[in-house]
Structures are given as C-alpha cells and as structure tokens.
C-alpha cells in the first residue's frame, strides 16, 4: 500500500493531489445531510421488479457536484439501484487519483451498506462504447428495464461518435466583450478582487460549446437505450441546468454556455414528447442553484458571486444534496412535479429571489480587495474549493499517512 501524508498543492483553484480520507468523509457527510425519505416518499416499486430491490437508475456524471448529490440522494431518498458513470483518473506512483475516484469508492461503500446494487463505471459517457456497456449491464443485471436517468455531465470536450469530430466548449460572452469582477487568492491565500475581460465568442465557438454541453449526448443516450428496448413504462429523465444571476448573465446565461443550456432545455421538450408517446415517460431539465464545483470555479466571476451569495444567505444556501432530494421526490411522484412556464423543474428559488439578488448586487458593487473580507464569506468559499479535493474537511487528521492506491469499485472501461 502506498501511504503518504498529503498536503494541498495548488495553482489557483486547481489542486495537484486529492485526499482519500477527506473525500470519503465528505461523501459520508453528504449522506448524513440528505433528508430521510418522508413516510409518503417511500420509493414505489416499479411493476415487475423484485420486491425491495428499488427502481433502476442511471446517473451520468456521478462522481462530483450535482451528479454525486443525485447518486447519494437517489440511494438514500429514492432507494435506487443501477449504474453510475463518471470519468476519473486512477492513482499513479507519483500522483493521487482524482478526487472523484475517491468519492466514488466512498459512494460504493455507502451503497453496499444500504444494500443497494450500484455498479460504477469509469469512462467517457460521450462514447458509444460506454453506452453499449451500460445497455449490456442493464440487460444482464437489472432486468432489462431502466426507470430513471439523471444527466449531470460537465466536460470541456466531446467527440461525436458518428462523425469523429472533436468539440471544445468555451466560456465566452456573445456579441461584445465582458468585463467582470473576479475573486482570486494569492499563494498565501490572501483574497484579491480583480477585473478580467473576456472577449466575445468568435467563429464556431457557440456551435462547439452547444455540441459539448447542449442536449445532443443526453438525447443519444435515450435513443440508444430506447433502441435496445430498455426504457421502462413511466421512465423519467432529468438533465441539470442553470440560469443564475443578472450579475453573471453576460458570461453565463447569455453567453456560449447559456446557448448550450437553452439547447439542453429544448432537447428536454423534444424528448418529453417522444417519451410520453412511447413509454408514458417524461424528460425535464432541473434548474439548480449555484454550488462550488470544479466546473463552476472555472467560470469568470462565479467565485466572487458565490462567496457573496453565501455571505447573504448563510445556512439558507441550499446544499446540492437537499436540492437533489427534492428532485427525486418530484420524479418519483412523492411530491407533485412543479414545472415553470418552460417545463423546467426549478430548485433555484432560494438563489434567485429579488431580496437575495438585490443584496448580492449591492455587495458586488462594493467589492474591492480592501472590502471583500467584510462582504463575502471567504472562509467558506476557500474551504469549499479545498474540500473539492478532500482537504479542509472537519474531523479528518491531515497529519496521518493515508493509502492513495484505492481500487475503483468495479469494472473500468
Ligand atoms: N455548479 C453549479 O453551480 C451548477 C448549478 C446548476 C446546474 N449545474 C449543472 O450541473 C451539471 C454538473 O455540473 P457540476 O458543477 O456538478 O460539475 P462537476 O465538475 O462537479 O462534475 C462533473 C461530472 O461529470 C463527469 N464527467 C465529465 N466528463 C465526463 C465524460 N466525458 N464522461 C463521463 N463523465 C464525465 C465528472 O467525472 C463528474 O462526475 C452541469 O450540467 C451544470 O451545468 C451546476
């Protein structure tokens, strides 16, 4: 066993190593934080499933952020079994595994303790190889019937299996350049508020971003599984989306990534119609609130925005696992499906209320390097970034050596 004492080494918001014990503890804490299912929210057994086995779910993007929350809440709240897919790097002699690798190992332990058969696959969800592997597993191990699919992939690149074309997503405004305030930390961890300018999308930037983060791959999954006859009666699917604040609109919702989200939401409407007709099923997008994740910290201005949001909301900032518990309740029919005018589940009301946005905007306006400590919850934000890699987790002894060569819990593609 390769045992080492690990301390954080980072460049900005990117860390070189991940801490296995910290990652394990975070997943356990997430499990604890997920509300138990209410009496009325007991998972309904799908017709034809072995008694007590639970509905069969496929979670894509299960090792981090909202997909991890979907997996944990799905296990605890909706009693799911099934397959969880993510794309993580194995440990090597010199480097630890990625944090998602360790979180996956911890999630597998939780699933086992809960008596749920959850298979974890590591590989490219955009590939047809992965789609075939999932379909085969559903057939062989889960009775050939899928009840739920949660799509929560955030990726910088995608290769289209039909054409072999490789696409790269970019985070750019559309039309004109965007200047935004942004929050950075220097090597000593001191905060700095800077202005950064991002030039507008050029050439095929929008098409490339839509090809990666829009609905094409989600639809391909549904078509693939439908083609193999694996969608159960009443099958329901949700893909994660974001709207966010007017403060970040130029770079997010009105930018290249916003175009991809609009495409994802359009895809939901098309899929919903098709699934309604074929299996009495439904497809929705779930619009969630801001959370500190590896993907979100890459967006200019989001770090500052999230730090200010937390200072305004404190404990009212709704953790991803609470939001996903609410999503499972709606998908499973334990609570009514509440859709907005555009057919989206909205779990972001706590973030987007006028009261909250007005307060965040006032702080944003006042934010400078000198004032930021009094305006944003910097301790929390800095801690959240470190916790993405398993550091700064309360209750973990960081002076103790830890084994880093933890195996993946199941087959690797
Ligand atoms: N973070 C936010 O503030 C926020 C808010 C609302 C909605 N969302 C949405 O939630 C979704 C997930 O974002 P996140 O912030 O949780 O991201 P994240 O970076 O925390 O997690 C991304 C997940 O995708 C997986 N992944 C990446 N490329 C893959 C590939 N090729 N094949 C298989 N798995 C792959 C990763 O392994 C990981 O499990 C996105 O659609 C995002 O827009 C995020």
Image (tube, rainbow, N blue to C red):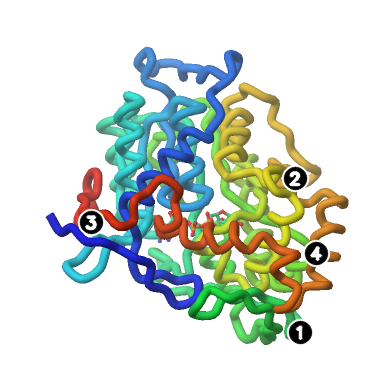
To which residue does mark 4 refer? Answer: 246
Foreground tag (3 vs 4):
3
Q: How far from the left and from the top, in percent, is residue 266?
A: 67, 53
Residue 13 lies, with reference to residue 346, above or below; the image says below
Whole-angstrom CA distance, mark 1 to mark 4, is 16 Å
Q: How far from the left and from the top, in percent, is residue 82?
A: 37, 34
Whole-angstrom CA distance, mark 2 to mark 1, is 31 Å
Q: Is the CB–ligand 1 distance for label 3 below 8 Å?
A: no
Q: Quadrant of residue 331?
A: top right
Quarter of the image with the C terminus is bottom left
Circle nearer the N terminus (2, 4): 4
Give the secondary structure at mark 4: helix
Circle nearer the N terminus (3, 2): 2
To which residue does mark 3 refer? Answer: 401
User: Which residue shows up at 75% across the image and 73% down it?
Assistant: 371
Give the secondary structure at mark 1: loop
Residue 175 lies, with reference to residue 105, above or below; the image says below
Q: Is the CB–ligand 1 distance for label 4 below 8 Å?
A: no
Whole-angstrom CA distance, mark 2 to mark 4, is 15 Å
Q: How far from the left and from the top, in percent, is residue 88?
A: 33, 59
Task: Tell me if 347 is positioned left or right of 26 in this view.
Answer: right
Circle nearer the N terminus (3, 1): 1
Whole-angstrom CA distance, mark 3 to mark 1, is 51 Å
Quarter of the image with the N terminus is bottom left
Residue 85 lies, with reference to residue 83, above or below; the image says below
To which residue does mark 2 refer? Answer: 350
Task: Tell me if 380 is positioned left or right of 156 in this view.
Answer: right
Circle nearer the N terminus (3, 4): 4
Task: Using the image, tell me which numbered label, if any, was put on residue 176.
Answer: 1
Task: Using the image, tell me which numbered label, if any, was put on residue 373.
Answer: none
The answer to which of 289 and 402 lies nearer the viewer is: 402
């Amino acid at each position: 066993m390769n045992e080492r004492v690990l301390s954080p080494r980072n460049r900005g918001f990117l860390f070189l190593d991940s801490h296995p014990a910290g990652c394990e503890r975070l997943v356990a804490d997430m499990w604890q934080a997920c509300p138990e299912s209410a009496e009325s929210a007991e998972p309904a057994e799908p017709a034809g499933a072995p008694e007590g086995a639970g509905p069969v779910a496929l979670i894509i993007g299960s090792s981090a952020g909202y997909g991890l929350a979907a997996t944990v809440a799905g296990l605890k709240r909706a009693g799911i079994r099934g397959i969880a897919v993510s794309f993580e790097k194995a440990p090597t002699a010199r480097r630890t595994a990625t944090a998602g690798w360790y979180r996956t190992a911890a999630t597998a332990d939780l699933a086992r303790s809960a008596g749920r058969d959850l298979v974890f696959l590591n590989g490219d969800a955009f590939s047809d190889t992965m789609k075939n592997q999932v379909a085969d597993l559903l057939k062989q191990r889960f009775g050939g019937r899928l009840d739920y699919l949660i799509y929560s992939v955030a990726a910088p690149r995608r290769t289209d299996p039909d054409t072999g074309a490789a696409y790269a997503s970019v985070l750019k405004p559309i039309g004109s350049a965007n200047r935004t305030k942004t929050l950075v930390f220097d090597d000593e961890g001191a905060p700095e508020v800077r202005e950064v300018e991002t030039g507008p999308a050029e050439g095929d930037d929008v098409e490339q971003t839509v090809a990666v983060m829009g609905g094409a791959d989600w639809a391909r999954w549904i078509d693939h599984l439908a083609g193999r006859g694996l969608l159960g009666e009443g099958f329901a699917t949700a893909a994660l989306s974001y709207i966010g604040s007017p403060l970040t609109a130029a770079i997010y919702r009105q930018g290249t990534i916003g175009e991809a989200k609009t495409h994802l939401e359009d895809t939901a409407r098309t899929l919903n119609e098709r699934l309604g007709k074929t299996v009495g099923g439904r497809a929705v997008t779930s619009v969630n609130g801001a959370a500190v994740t590896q993907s979100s910290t890459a967006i200019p201005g989001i770090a500052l925005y999230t730090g200010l949001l937390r200072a305004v909301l404190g404990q009212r900032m709704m953790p991803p696992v609470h939001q996903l518990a609410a999503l499972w309740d709606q998908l499973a029919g334990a609570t009514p499906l509440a859709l907005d005018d555009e057919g989206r589940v909205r779990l972001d009301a706590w973030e987007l209320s006028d009261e909250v946005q007005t307060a965040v905007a006032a702080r944003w306006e006042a934010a400078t390097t000198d004032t930021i400590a009094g305006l944003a919850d910097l301790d929390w934000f800095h801690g959240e970034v470190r916790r993405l890699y398993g550091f700064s987790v309360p209750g973990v002894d960081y002076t103790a050596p830890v084994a880093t060569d933890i195996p993946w819990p199941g087959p690797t593609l």
